[in-house]
Amino acid sequence: MGKRVGVEVSIAAADAVGMANVDVVAAYPITPQTHIVEHLSDLVANGKLDAEFIPVESEHSAMSVCCGSSALGARTFTCTSSQGLALMNEIVFIAASMRLPIVMILANRSLSGPLSIWNDHTDVMSVRDCGWIQVFTETGQEVFDHVMWAFRVAEDRQVSLPVIINMDGFILTHVIEPIEFWDSAMVKQYLPDFSPINVLNPDHPTTVGGFGMPGIYTEAKVAQNEALVKSKPHILKAWQELGAVTGRYYQPVETYKIDGAETVFLSMGSTGDTVAMAVDELRAQGKPAGLIKLRLWRPFPFEELRLAARGVKRLIIIDRAVSYGGPGGPVASEIRSAFYGEKEMPVVTNFICGLAGRDVTPEDYIAIYSKSEKMAQGQVRQEDYVFYGVRE
């Protein structure tokens, strides 16, 4: 097994990228992602990583460079956050459409305005439908492991799609955690050399991402969607084989104290640990509480979610983003859609909280559970969504 080290998660993430032996890193610094690219630039400058580090003038340029390098057959990495993602938005969609296996860490941070550097999921939800494979990580160890996993999945010749690794800004990026580093033998066993399907070559000119007339555009989008949906078996296989190497077996949907649970929280990202503490306390009080952790965001794990929630009467969806003028939070709308038409559909209550890094404690989640119970008992009005903790 690898060596266990206490280290800042951003540094560990950069070290994982280095151990994956990337060829090109193109990135622009933005809080709270900056420590990742700073450390990667140090690794390259000190000769510890044989790669091209390209300090571009903007995030739009960063993703543009990534598209070019990936199309040339280079193992390519970038990372960004919040407004940086908004600036590279145009090219993010192009990368997926062109089936370029780029890996990006997204240090989740709220979008302006008002200006905030703190964590929520408004940035990633702005590219919910960009066509990338997307996962959420709960701990630093998950971030480290998923760097290797992301390259493995993205570069699978049956997949060839870009991957976003979501890690909560500050809550993960800037904390020190005990992380088991892989040794070189583990990396070699798990992550093969990049063997791209199509490579641009000046000796054999070709057009990539050219103009699509109305007569072909729909078919191109259908093919893109099918590719993302069909990536799921390869995602599951890569997790299974990661477990064989590390002993850590990840799943698209994971549960905590779900047996006998009637009211169950659903979380994404680092809040899972905090919600689990609330579930422990609720169980100690004799409350039938449980927790579902949604790791795989795209392609959406419909079957696994329905199986995890079988027999559950109420789902409390924790959203850290707002669908303005819509049904509440984007995660809740996805969950409601996933259960639509099912014979046993749980009642979904959506709580929007933790925006821009506002603290949500285990006691808050217990209060959320209590309000959900009162809704179920008719003591308070059943609401489609609730902004939790809003000051009067």
Image (cartoon, grey):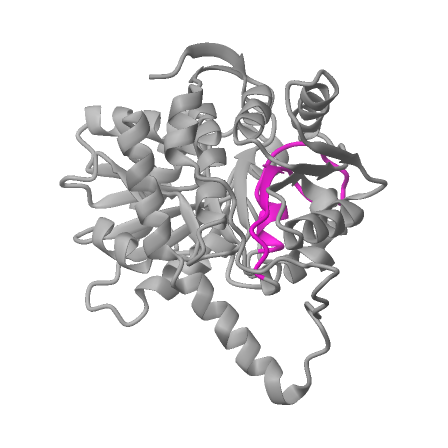
241 relative to 356 in the view: left or right: left
In the rendered image, residue 125 lying in the magenta stretch gets the answer yes
Residue 146, above or below 327:
above
Q: Residue at point 21% right, 54% down?
A: 307
Residue 300 falls in image quadrant: bottom left
114, 273: nearer the viewer: 273
* Residue 293 picture location, percent across and down: 35, 41
Say how many tags the image has: 0
Q: Residue at point 72% right, 24% down?
A: 41
197, 391: nearer the viewer: 197
Q: Residue at point 38% right, 63% down?
A: 230
* Residue 194 picture location, percent across and down: 52, 44
Residue 192, above or below 224:
above
* Residue 322 picture location, percent across and down: 58, 52
Q: Can residue 50 be seen by looking at this rendering?
A: yes
275, 2: nearer the viewer: 2
Residue 57 falls in image quadrant: top right
The N terminus is located in which quarter?
Answer: top left
* Residue 298 picture location, percent across and down: 45, 55
Residue 17 falls in image quadrant: top right
In the rendered image, residue 7 lying in the magenta stretch gets the answer no
60 relative to 100 in the view: left or right: right
Residue at the far bottom: name it. Answer: 215
379, 194: nearer the viewer: 194
Residue 251, above or below 4:
below
Residue at the far right: name it. Answer: 57
- Give the magenta-colored segment's residue range: 99-127
Residue at the far left: name it. Answer: 260
By secondary structure, the bulk of the magenta-drawn segment is best described as loop
Q: Residue at point 64% right, 18% down?
A: 48
